[in-house]
Image (cartoon, grey):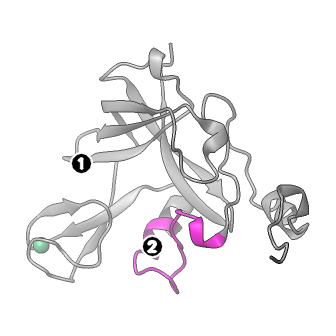
Amino acid sequence: MAATASSPAQRPEVSSTQEARTGASPPQGAGGEPPQRTPFLLDFYPLEDAHHTRISRFFDELRAGRFVTTWCPRDQKLLWPPRVVCPDCHGEDLSWKELPRSGHLYAFSAVLAGAPLGMESQVPFVVGLVELQGVPLRIFSRIAPATYDRLEIGDPVELETYPVPGDRVFFRFRPTSPR
Ligand SMILES: [Zn+2]
């Protein structure tokens, strides 16, 4: 058997260099830590550039602080997640609409075990369904920084973005009146 397994100490130095280049430092504590770099094939964050996804505009807007999704003019319907084809009429003539950044907790739960790779050190953490203010969408998201025991249904939350390794960005919701 060839000894090919590598420990974290043997990871190439370029990893830490790349992590240091991810820019803004997100808030810390209670599950607010940034995700750790994971092996490429196990990285569950989406590839965000136009070469890899036809909804790259969603990530471009997110990077600029705007939360958007697609809208089907034929059905007069917001689609979430953003799509390239309407699941109802199969039309491809979709437009983009900006979404509110605030909402409230419709439901939530805690992840106590079995976290995805790279998030093991953040267990326990909270996930939930956020009902956005004024639009008929409920969005599944990480809720952070947050402690399960201190949350209640209906708590107000607000969108925030955070950097993901590989010059990417993602979103989560932060409680705005933590107990
Ligand atoms: Zn449609």
Above or below, comparing residue 108 to residue 82 in the picture: above
Stretch of the chain drawn in magenta: 40-59
Above or below, comparing residue 63 to residue 41 in the picture: above
Q: Which image quarter holds the N terminus?
A: bottom right
Residue 71 drawn at (x, y percent): 23, 67
Above or below, comparing residue 162 to residue 59 in the picture: above
Rendering quadrant holding ligand 1: bottom left
Q: Any mark on residue 137, and which?
A: 1
Q: Any mark on residue 9, and which?
A: none
Q: Residue beneath label 2, please?
A: 57
125 relative position to 33: left or right:
left
> Would you say residue 55 sits in the magenta stretch?
yes
45 relative position to 1: left or right:
left
Residue 152 drawn at (x, y percent): 36, 18
Numbered label tally: 2
Q: Earlier in the sequence, mark 2 or mark 1?
A: 2
Contact, CB < 8 Å: mark 2 with mark 1?
no
For the view shown, which residue lies furthest in the bottom direction?
51
Task: State the SS at label 2.
Answer: helix
Q: Label 2 vs label 1: CA separation?
A: 19 Å
